[in-house]
Image: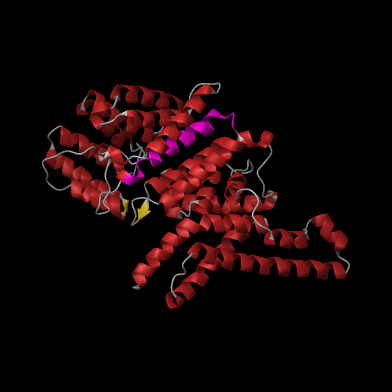
């Protein structure tokens, strides 16, 4: 296997497996920063070992075993140090300063089988109130989503150094606060819920439309996010937004088989063969949306987005889509949770319901306000609207601009393809639409 191919496979394996490895080590060590450090050590070992021996049949298990062995070694060292302190009469000092935790118990626990869901525990730790909302989400995406600092920066539309500082400070704050590795009790869950939901959905979105790399999708991340959402629903069954998020993820994930053509190229929403959409996932999503609506309170942001996805899921063909209803739902979403991305998606819906000129005015205002710098789907949507208005040269220039901004190889190829002269028009929804 060529070095470039091996490195690409290693990067994919790490993205898919690192979250579970770090979560497991955090439960063993009670230290997020140390867990990430030892997980990285396991990756280094793989980089040294696999080029000669080959990638194992179960690379995730190999990484997990290697990382756990390093963690057990660290716990043994700490236990020996603790006993040494005890032998020389430092028990009182250790107890007063909390220097010596119960390493023997930790070692026994580390050897035990998993109890509960380590990934969900880690999300609740990273979403602890001791951290700011921005730091919670950035840290969790780094630890659980396997995202690079640059990818997280693009998701937040901020600079990479800002994200790096947030992550470093968040780890230090958790260590200083000695946050326990556990799912908090019912009274402590609700204050963290908004951050937990945001993190789960951002993990899902990175799986649904990868921000960088060679793959259009990372299905393992979508499945992780769905599983975490379902576990969360068992913990907080009376929270409508939990069910709203599950509904949104189920309906979006139902399109997976239709989002690539036989050659592996991306297929946008209105060009997809809806017969390939997973009817079972759609049914589960609609049922979750119904559960959300049955609970007390108005629809929240995730339930509204699920209702938007349901409009597409209920339409047998693109022509059957109720675009007027979609615009109304985007109006409600923009009033409840305004953001430039919501405004862009709303513009797409307006273009479909009321014509491209009205939508183009909204998109050009977003560009003038510089609310989405570096976001490739802004010029892409503008290209669609210009193409529908017959302004083909301007449309192709917009698609080329979008391709230059994209960090994903498949996305970039799609945009460059759309920049070529062609007679037909295709819809260009942002991937999250």
At horizontal 57% and vertical 50% (from top left) the residue drawn is 119
Q: Looking at the image, is 227 positioned above or below residue 413? A: above
Q: Is 120 or 128 nearer to us in this picture?
A: 120
Residue 204 is left or right of residue 181, and the answer is left
- Segment colored magenta: 237-257
Q: Find residue 160 and report its horizontal and vertical position in percent.
A: 44, 52
Q: Residue 186's image quarter? A: top right
Residue 345 is left or right of residue 13, and the answer is left
Is the magenta region chiefly helix, strand or loop? helix
Q: Is 136 or 253 nearer to us in this picture?
A: 253
Residue 72 is left or right of residue 403, and the answer is right
Outermost residue, bottom direction? 52
At horizontal 42% and vertical 47% (from top left) the residue drawn is 206
At horizontal 29% and vertical 53% (from top left) the residue drawn is 410
Q: Find residue 115 and report its horizontal and vertical position in percent.
A: 65, 51
Q: Does the magenta stretch include residue 311?
A: no
Q: Is 359 or 28 nearer to us in this picture?
A: 28
Q: Find residue 239 and report its horizontal and vertical position in percent.
A: 57, 30
């Amino acid at each position: 296997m060529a070095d470039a191919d091996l490195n690409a496979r290693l990067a994919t394996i790490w993205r898919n497996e690192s979250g579970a490895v770090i979560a497991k080590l955090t439960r063993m060590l009670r230290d997020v920063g140390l867990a990430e450090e030892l997980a990285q050590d396991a990756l280094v070992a793989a980089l040294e070992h696999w080029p000669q021996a080959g990638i194992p049949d179960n690379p995730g298990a190999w990484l997990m075993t290697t990382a756990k062995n390093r963690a057990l070694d660290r716990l043994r060292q700490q236990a020996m140090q603790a006993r040494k302190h005890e032998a020389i009469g430092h028990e009182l000092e250790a107890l007063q300063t909390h220097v010596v935790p119960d390493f023997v118990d930790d070692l026994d626990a580390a050897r035990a089988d998993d109890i509960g869901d380590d990934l969900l525990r880690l999300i609740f730790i990273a979403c602890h109130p001791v951290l700011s909302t921005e730091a919670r989400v950035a840290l969790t995406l780094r630890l659980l989503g396997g995202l690079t600092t640059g990818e997280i920066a693009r998701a937040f539309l901020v600079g990479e150094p800002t994200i790096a500082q947030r992550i470093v400070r968040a780890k230090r704050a958790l260590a200083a606060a000695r946050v326990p590795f556990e799912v908090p009790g019912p009274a402590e869950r609700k204050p963290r819920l908004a951050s937990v939901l945001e993190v789960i959905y951002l993990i899902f979105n990175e799986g649904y439309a990868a921000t960088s790399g060679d793959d259009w999708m990372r299905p393992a991340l979508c499945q992780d996010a769905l599983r975490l959402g379902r576990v969360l629903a068992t913990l907080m069954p009376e929270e409508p937004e939990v069910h709203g998020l599950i509904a949104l993820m189920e309906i979006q994930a139902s399109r997976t088989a239709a989002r690539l053509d036989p050659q592996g190229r991306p297929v946008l929403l209105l060009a997809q063969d809806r017969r390939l959409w997973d009817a079972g996932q759609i049914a589960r999503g609609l049922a979750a949306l119904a559960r959300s609506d049955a609970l007390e309170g108005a629809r929240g942001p995730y339930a509204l987005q699920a209702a938007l996805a349901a409009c597409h899921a209920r339409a047998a063909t693109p022509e059957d889509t109720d675009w007027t209803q979609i615009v109304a739902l985007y109006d409600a979403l923009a009033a409840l949770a305004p953001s430039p991305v919501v405004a862009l998606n709303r513009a797409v819906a307006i273009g479909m319901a009321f014509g491209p000129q009205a939508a183009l005015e909204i998109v050009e205002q977003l560009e003038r306000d510089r609310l989405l710098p570096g976001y490739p789907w802004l010029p892409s949507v503008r290209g669609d609207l210009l193409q529908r208005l017959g302004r083909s040269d301007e449309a192709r220039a917009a698609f080329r601009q979008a391709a230059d901004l994209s960090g994903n190889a498949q996305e970039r190829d799609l945009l460059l393809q759309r920049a070529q002269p062609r007679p037909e028009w295709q819809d260009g929804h942002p991937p999250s639409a």
